[in-house]
Image (cartoon, helix red, strand yellow):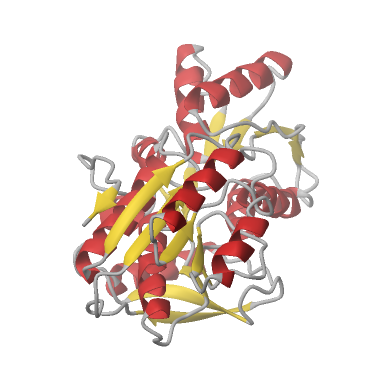
């Protein structure tokens, strides 16, 4: 069930997050949406406070698999899983596949994790369906699998720590659609959903298209591609070449970073506006400097923290939320300076952590 929010409701949500979250070391309680029935496309969200365990009962061994660590988004998730593993007192080993074209490598890395003795596996999936056979095999060994960030369609997963990227895409779409209501002059929008086939990309695309269909926005043919800056830059240049009258560029945070650089280089930054459908340090910086209009935040650091807590709760046979994610809210120039960094991003000087002992 998709929910849309007014600007005032989003402001209240951001305010609630600010009042609920404390420091990075003491990040809870945190406002989240628990989805019931879990894993259902018709799930209904309930706003609750998430409070993790104080400490694990033993040093559980948790494997974490990411699609890549090429951008600051996944660095933020890494910060979340690493810091929560330290806080709870468990082991964590992180592997990354190097990009969204490397499904076979992700599968092989997870198999190696399980072979060496991992007791739980947290997966930021390259493909929504491509890991289903592996997950069935893992869970048959009584090893819980937690779906973090991207979305997995397997019925065998134990828990989800993620938000609806359909809602993320919808909020980005609503953000610009309200400025160009139906009946007004047609406005072209370059749309960059991300790597084709990824669950989060399909969801964001649906949300964005649904949110913009009853407006004056003309959404150009989607340009799919890996979330590396080089790949996104090429896609942006292609759209600018084919559509010199494009008014907006909308895509993942790394796309927005690339868009800012390309537009400034071509002296188009006053003509073409940029919106992201999630945050990273570049997007946050761009919003602060007025170069990016806004972006919905999925609090990726908190998603990583919750995934670790879910894994420990499952291993210890304790009660846990099966399907939960931070409350999404829009970050724009009205609230950007009021939001503490630990809600949105890893610390500015954070370096990747692949192992916690």
Q: Is 159 in front, or is 206?
A: 159
- For the point 54% across and 39% down, the residue is 105
Q: Is 231 in front, or is 289?
A: 231
Q: Quadrant of the N terminus?
A: bottom right
Q: Is 188 in front, or is 227?
A: 227
Percent from the top left, x then y, of residue 185?
A: 76, 36
Image mark count: 0
- For the point 42% across and 70% down, the residue is 12
- For the point 65% across and 18% down, the residue is 240
Percent from the top left, x then y, of residue 59?
A: 24, 70
- For the point 68% across and 17% down, the residue is 244
The image shows residue 28, relative to residue 135, as above or below, that is: below
Q: Is 159 in front, or is 295?
A: 159
Taking 129 as reference, is 302 left or right? left
Q: For the view shown, which residue lies furthest in the front direction?
A: 115
Percent from the top left, x then y, of residue 175?
A: 58, 50
Q: Inspect this view and state whether residue 284 appears.
A: no
* Quadrant position of residue 157: bottom right
Taking 48 as reference, is 37 left or right? right
Q: Quadrant of the C terminus?
A: bottom left
Taking 71 as reference, is 273 left or right? right
The image shows residue 81, relative to residue 240, as above or below, that is: below
Q: Inspect this view and state whether residue 221 appears.
A: yes
Percent from the top left, x then y, of residue 197?
A: 69, 44
Taking 66 as reference, is 126 left or right? right
């Amino acid at each position: 069930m998709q929910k849309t929010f007014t600007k005032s409701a989003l402001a209240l949500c951001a305010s609630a997050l600010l009042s609920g979250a404390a420091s990075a070391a003491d990040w809870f309680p945190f406002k989240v949406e628990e989805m019931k029935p879990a894993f259902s496309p018709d799930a209904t969200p309930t706003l609750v406070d998430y409070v993790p365990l104080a400490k694990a009962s033993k040093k559980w061994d948790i494997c974490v698999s990411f699609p890549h660590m090429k951008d600051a988004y996944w660095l933020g998730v890494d910060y979340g899983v690493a810091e929560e593993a330290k806080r709870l007192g468990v082991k964590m080993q992180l592997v990354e596949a190097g990009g969204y074209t490397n499904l076979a490598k992700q599968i092989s890395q997870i198999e190696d994790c399980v072979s060496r003795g991992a007791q739980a596996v947290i997966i930021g999936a390259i493909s929504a369906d491509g890991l289903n056979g592996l997950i069935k095999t893992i869970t048959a060994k009584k090893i819980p699998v937690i779906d973090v960030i991207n979305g997995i369609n397997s019925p065998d997963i134990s828990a989800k720590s993620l938000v609806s990227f359909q809602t993320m895409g919808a909020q980005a779409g609503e953000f610009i659609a309200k400025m160009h209501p139906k009946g007004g002059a047609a406005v072209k929008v370059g749309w960059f959903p991300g790597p084709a086939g990824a669950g989060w990309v399909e969801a964001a695309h649906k949300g964005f298209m649904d949110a913009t269909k009853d407006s004056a926005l003309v959404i150009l043919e989607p340009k799919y591609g890996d979330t590396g800056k080089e790949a996104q830059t090429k896609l942006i240049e292609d759209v600018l070449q084919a559509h010199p009258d494009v008014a907006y560029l909308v895509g993942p945070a790394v796309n927005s970073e690339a868009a800012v650089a390309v537009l400034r280089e071509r002296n188009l930054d006053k003509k073409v506006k940029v919106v992201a459908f999630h945050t990273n340090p570049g997007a946050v910086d761009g919003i602060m400097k007025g170069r990016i209009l806004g972006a919905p935040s999925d609090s990726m650091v908190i998603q990583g923290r919750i995934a670790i807590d879910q894994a420990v709760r499952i291993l210890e046979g304790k009660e846990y939320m099966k399907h939960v994610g931070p409350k999404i809210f829009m970050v724009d120039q009205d609230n950007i300076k009021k939001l503490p960094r630990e809600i949105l991003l890893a610390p500015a000087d954070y370096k990747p952590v692949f192992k916690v002992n």
